[in-house]
Image: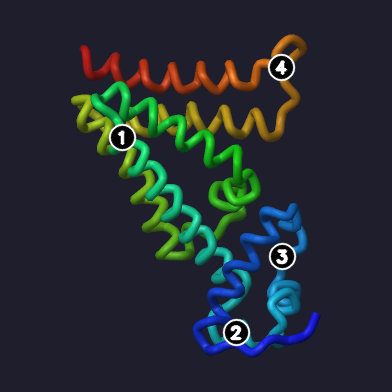
Amino acid sequence: MSKRSYHHGDVRQAALDAVLEMLDGGEAGSLSLRTISQRIGVSHHALYRHFDNLEDLLGEVVSGCLEHLIALLRQAIEQGDDLEHRVLLGCVAYLKHALDHPARYELMFAPSTPMASHQKAWQAGETSFGVLIALAVEAGASEPALLAFQVWTTMHGTVELLKHVALPAGLGDKRSALLSQTVAACTHTFLRVANA
């Protein structure tokens, strides 16, 4: 690949974009500073002007992915007419985004993700969880964080199972139904608290 000329700030963005392209293209296992630099046509050492190491770069990518997810959730929730509708729309948006971008989702929540050591990514993660907490507060939950966590684990578990586990016989053609039931379960969890 021929090397291209980048302005100082462009190399940083090009590297972030390259990681997303590699994730979406099924190349997550090939991520390294060397392969990323080759992909965007700059020297391996040029990336060190923008990132401390691969972990730092991936932390920036995770932060961007979470910020995008936050925007999607807020946009979806704002369309709801009432609490039930807002929860439903938020859950649908979350599940759709996770399953449409499985490699990005994997990077965001994998145990090896450098979120804890990357302040910007950690803050984005807290903000994304805060979207659910806000709905839990609206529902009148006595422990909003606990309710938000319960609903998130339901959605996250469904995503992980659909991505990594072969469905039992009889359920292989019922993916849409399983997703609908997950949304219904999450919505019911919120409404049970709201109506208590």
Measured in 3D between alpha carbons, the distance from the residue under mark 2 to the one under mark 3, in whole angstroms, is: 15 Å
Q: Are marks 4 and 2 in contact (CB under 8 Å)?
A: no
Q: Which residue is disc 4 drawn over?
A: 173
Give the residue type at disc 3.
Answer: Leu
Report helix, strand or loop for mark 2.
helix
Q: How packed is label 2: few (under 14 Cα within 10 Å), some, or many (20 or more)?
A: some
Q: Are marks 3 and 4 in contact (CB under 8 Å)?
A: no
Give the residue type at disc 1.
Answer: Gln
Position of 131 relative to 142 (above/below):
below
Residue positioned 58% across, 81% down in the render: 11
Q: Earlier in the sequence, mark 3 or mark 4?
A: 3
Q: Nearer the viewer, mark 4 or mark 1?
A: 1
| Quadrant in which the N terminus appears | bottom right
- Checking the image for residue 96, the label placed there is none
Position of 16 relative to 9 (above/below):
above
Q: Which residue is disc 2 drawn over?
A: 48
Where residue 128 sits: x, y (%)? 38, 47
Q: Nearer the viewer, mark 1 or mark 3?
A: 1
Q: Earlier in the sequence, mark 1 or mark 2?
A: 2
Q: How packed is label 1: few (under 14 Cα within 10 Å), some, or many (20 or more)?
A: few
For the residue pair 66 and 180, the one nearer the viewer reads as 180
Measured in 3D between alpha carbons, the distance from the residue under mark 1 to the one under mark 2, in whole angstroms, is: 42 Å
Measured in 3D between alpha carbons, the distance from the residue under mark 3 to the one under mark 4, in whole angstroms, is: 34 Å
Position of 69 relative to 83 (above/below):
below
Report helix, strand or loop for mark 4.
loop
Q: Earlier in the sequence, mark 4 or mark 2?
A: 2
Report helix, strand or loop for mark 1.
loop
Q: How packed is label 3: few (under 14 Cα within 10 Å), some, or many (20 or more)?
A: some
Residue positioned 72% across, 82% down in the render: 41
Q: Which residue is disc 3 drawn over?
A: 31
